[in-house]
Image: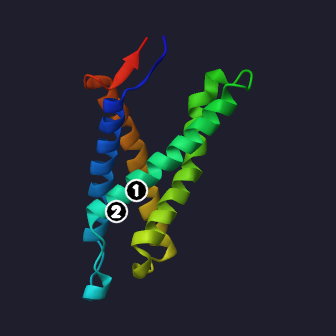
């Protein structure tokens, strides 16, 4: 039985992502030492909105490309989901690197700090995927089924 996200479901998913990424940005901002007004972190809402936008655009492109290719490869059906999420990790590393470059470059994080921020960001991204998908299934109007 085929199903997919209804317009309301897309809004639920994007809303979960926006709230989650903004919360993560707020936590990151709170941990930054602010020595002067020049080093004031960007608004958590701006960072969360940008990360949500990056994720929706890149996620749609990668998802459509992957599932289009996977549907043509024989025998991949049994492992398609696991393979997709495994291949999504390096994509998410690049997304988080882009976000750090856009909003946190003035902080000049050392490599260890970047790895921690990106690693935690990837965990947050996957957790928000699960919460967003659950919202689509649980809240009325989130999915279409035929």
Q: In this view, does 52 lie above or below 31?
A: above
Q: In this view, does 61 lie above or below 54?
A: above
Residue extending furthest toward the right = 74
Q: Is residue 66 above or below residue 97?
A: above
Residue under the image location 33 percent in, 29 percent down: 136
What secondary structure is marked by label 1? helix
In screen coordinates, is 84 left or right of 105?
right
Is residue 64 visible in the rendered structure shown here? yes
The residue nearer to you, when weighing 113 against 9, is 9
Q: Which mark identifies residue 70?
A: none
Residue under the image location 51 percent in, 64 percent down: 97
x and y percentages locating residue 99 in the rendered image: 45, 64
x and y percentages locating residue 10 in the rendered image: 36, 35
Quarter where residue 88 is shown: top right
Q: Mark 2 points at which residue?
A: 47
x and y percentages locating residue 23 in the rendered image: 26, 56
The residue nearer to you, when weighing 142 against 82, is 142
What secondary structure is marked by label 2? helix
Quadrant containing the C terminus in the rendered view: top left
Q: Residues within 10 Å of mark 1 (few under 14, many from 20)?
A: many
Q: How crowded is mark 2: few (under 14 residues within 10 Å), some or many (20 or more)?
A: many
Quarter where residue 27 is shown: bottom left
Quarter where residue 103 is shown: bottom left
Residue under the image location 25 percent in, 86 percent down: 37
In screen coordinates, is 100 left or right of 25?
right
Is residue 83 visible in the rendered structure shown here? no
Residue under the image location 30 percent in, 71 percent down: 42
x and y percentages locating residue 59 in the rendered image: 51, 44
Q: Mark 1 points at which residue?
A: 51
- C-alpha distance separating marks 1 and 2: 6 Å
The number of discs equals: 2
Disc 1, disc 2: CB below 8 Å?
Answer: yes
């Amino acid at each position: 039985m085929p199903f997919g996200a209804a317009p309301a479901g897309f809004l639920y998913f994007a809303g979960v992502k926006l709230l989650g990424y903004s919360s993560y940005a707020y936590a990151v901002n709170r941990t930054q030492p602010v020595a002067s007004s020049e080093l004031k972190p960007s608004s958590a809402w701006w960072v969360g909105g940008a990360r949500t936008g990056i994720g929706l655009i890149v996620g749609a492109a990668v998802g459509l490309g992957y599932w289009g290719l996977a549907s043509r490869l024989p025998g991949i059906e049994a492992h398609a989901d696991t393979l997709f999420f495994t291949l999504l990790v390096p994509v998410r590393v690049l997304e988080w690197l882009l976000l750090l470059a856009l909003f946190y470059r003035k902080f000049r994080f050392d490599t260890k700090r970047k790895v921690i921020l990106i690693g935690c960001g990837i965990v947050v991204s996957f957790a928000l995927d699960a919460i967003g998908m659950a919202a689509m299934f649980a809240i009325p109007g989130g999915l279409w089924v035929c």
